[in-house]
């Protein structure tokens, strides 16, 4: 799968790039804030976006809203070091597939990617618009 990674902090961005590449995925691009994420999505059309919640210029939830309004089938995973049920619920309401807790754990990332892969296969084989079960930051993946 092709990923767009969005995070204003260098360390988590680099960690996620390394993990995704080690798992055999392509990092199509990166962005450092929500506004740049919206532009990057328009240019790159990645399979999945993994996006931080708290960022400058435009936060992740606003970027999620903007991306999903223009591209209702966009697959977005939110990431946060905040373990707020409210943030996870808002992300789900806006169309995020999952919320990943930071720091990233490779086994959780693999699990989320596998679930997204199964969802992609199911939506290609039938016309179902069902989404995979949302997994909030406060629940194990």
Image (cartoon, rainbow, N blue to C red):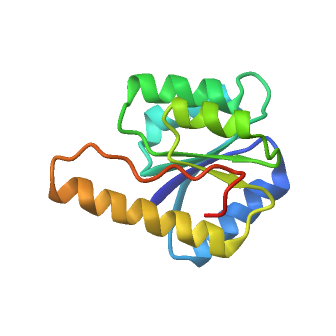
Q: Quadrant of the N terminus?
A: bottom left
Residue 123 in percent (x, y) is at: 25, 53
* Residue depicted at 46% across the width and 52% down the height: 133
Considering every residue shown, the one lying at the far left of the view is 126
* Residue 1 at least partly seen: no
Taking the spot 80% from the left edge, 47% from the top edge, the residue there is: 83
> Would you say 43 lies left or right of 91 here?
left
In which quarter of the view is residue 53 placed?
top right
User: 29 or 130: nearer the eye?
Assistant: 130
| Quarter of the rendering containing residue 111 | bottom right
Q: Quadrant for the C terminus, please.
A: bottom right
At 35% from the left and 38% from the top, the residue drawn is 73
Nearest to the observer: residue 41 or residue 73? 73
> Can the viewer see residue 17?
yes
Residue 19 drawn at (x, y percent): 66, 71
Measured as percent of width and height from the top left, residue 65 is found at 53, 25
Left or right of 55 on screen, residue 34: left
Q: Position of residue 113 (x, y in %)?
A: 50, 65
User: Exactly how many numbered labels are in the figure?
Assistant: 0
Residue 30 versus residue 93: which sits nearer the camera?
Answer: 93
Along the horizontal axis of the image, is 52 left or right of 68?
right
Q: Is residue 16 above or below residue 41?
A: below
């Amino acid at each position: 799968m092709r990923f767009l990674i969005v995070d204003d902090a260098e360390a988590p961005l680099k960690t996620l790039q390394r993990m995704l590449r080690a798992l055999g995925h392509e990092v199509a691009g990166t962005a450092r804030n929500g506004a740049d994420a919206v532009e990057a999505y328009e240019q790159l059309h990645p399979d999945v976006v993994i996006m931080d919640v708290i960022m400058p210029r435009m936060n992740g939830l606003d970027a999620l809203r903007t991306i999903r309004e223009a591209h209702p089938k966009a697959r977005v995973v939110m990431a946060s070091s905040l373990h707020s049920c409210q943030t996870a619920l808002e992300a789900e309401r806006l169309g995020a597939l999952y919320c990943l807790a930071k720091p990233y754990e490779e086994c959780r990332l693999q699990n989320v990617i596998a679930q997204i892969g199964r969802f992609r296969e199911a939506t290609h084989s039938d016309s179902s618009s069902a989404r995979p079960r949302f997994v909030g930051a406060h629940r194990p993946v």
